[in-house]
């Protein structure tokens, strides 16, 4: 897998333009995530569209100045970081309607990169506009704090010394739960990321990821197809990953 600094993609922020949410085919996921509330209506007035990005293109790179928060509008994306030796670590995967880049607020720049997984559209929320908006709509601050808290909790899925089977089961269950919260199908998980990406995120070998998916398939927990997988027995899958999910 190439290190992120080897690719040359023009900064996606140059293709941002204000559009609002009217007529957006993907607005239902954002509304389920909270953006449809009257007390957050200002977010819909400041949002800009970014993309369409193709698979492997960058939304932003490390050391890019922090100017905005982002959400996936359609498709999926991953946040990655690269150490001094060029080793890549997948920190998170982002679903439609999920806000990210809050970690750059304290630094003033992004210390990681966000990469499109397949054809992906993003929404951009200029931070200066957000700060002004928070003075008139205090619930915007609460929404950002709640988002940050949820992301910190999700980081547990890739940490700790848990068995590989529990990590994988918790990862799939968490994706399903997040899709349900966003009003998306919870029994079908599109997986545009590679097995290597999943293994990197969960600190598992790629072969282990493939072996575990096959084991869950043979147990009747999931059905795998080219687009992703269907969850056939979510209760059994949740039970396998319960220690990570309940903590």
Image (cartoon, rainbow, N blue to C red):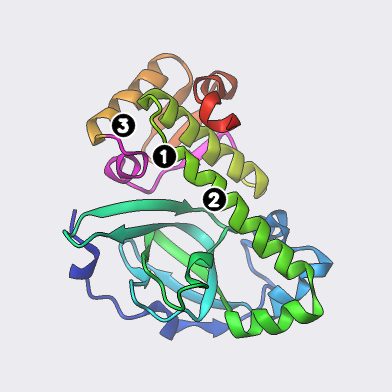
The residue under label 2 is 152
* Bounds of the magenta segment: 186-204
Q: Are marks 1 and 3 in contact (CB under 8 Å)?
A: no
Q: CA distance from mark 1 to mark 2?
A: 11 Å
- Label 2 vs 3, first from the N-terminus: 2
Q: Are marks 2 and 3 in contact (CB under 8 Å)?
A: no
Identify the mark at residue 209; answer none if there is no mark: 3
- Label 1 vs 2, first from the N-terminus: 2
Residue located 30% across and 44% down the image: 200
- Residue 201: give x, y in percent of width and height: 36, 44
Q: Would residue 116 appear left or right of 74 to someone viewing this image?
A: left
Residue 145 figure quarter? bottom right
**In the image, is residue 39 part of the stretch drawn in magenta?**
no
Q: CA distance from mark 2 to mark 3?
A: 24 Å
**In the image, is residue 202 part of the stretch drawn in magenta?**
yes
- Residue 12: give x, y in percent of width and height: 40, 78
- Label 1 vs 3, first from the N-terminus: 1
Residue located 34% across and 76% down the image: 63
The residue under label 1 is 159
Task: Give the secondary structure at mark 1.
Answer: loop
Q: CA distance from mark 1 to mark 3?
A: 16 Å
* Viewer-side residue, 226 vs 147: 147
**Circle 2 Cα neighbour tier, 10 Å, few/some/many (<14 / 14–19 / ≥20):** few
Q: Which residue appears farthest toward the right when viewing the image?
A: 38
**Circle 1 Cα neighbour tier, 10 Å, few/some/many (<14 / 14–19 / ≥20):** few
């Amino acid at each position: 897998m190439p290190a992120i600094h080897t690719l040359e993609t023009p900064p996606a922020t140059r293709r941002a333009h204000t559009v609002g949410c009217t007529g957006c085919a993907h607005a239902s996921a954002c509304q389920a995530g909270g953006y449809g509330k009257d007390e957050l209506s200002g977010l819909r007035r400041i949002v800009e569209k970014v993309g369409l990005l193709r698979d492997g293109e960058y939304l932003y790179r490390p050391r890019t100045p922090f100017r905005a928060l982002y959400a996936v509008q359609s498709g999926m994306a991953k946040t990655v970081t690269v150490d001094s030796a060029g080793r890549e670590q997948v920190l998170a995967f982002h679903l439609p309607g999920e806000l990210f880049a809050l970690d750059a607020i304290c630094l003033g720049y992004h210390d990681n990169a966000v990469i499109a997984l397949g054809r992906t559209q993003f929404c951009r929320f200029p931070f200066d506009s957000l700060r002004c908006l928070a003075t008139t709509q205090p619930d915007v601050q609460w929404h950002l704090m709640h988002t940050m808290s949820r992301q910190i909790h999700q980081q547990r899925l890739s940490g700790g010394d848990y068995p590989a089977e529990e990590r994988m089961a918790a990862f799939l269950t968490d994706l399903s739960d997040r899709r349900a919260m966003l009003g998306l199908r919870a029994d079908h998980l599109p997986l545009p990321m590679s097995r290597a990406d999943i293994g990197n995120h969960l600190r598992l070998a790629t072969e282990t990821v493939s072996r575990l998916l096959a084991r869950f398939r043979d147990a009747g927990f999931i059905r795998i197809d080219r687009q992703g997988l269907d969850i056939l027995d979510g209760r059994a899958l949740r039970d396998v990953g319960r220690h990570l999910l309940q903590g």
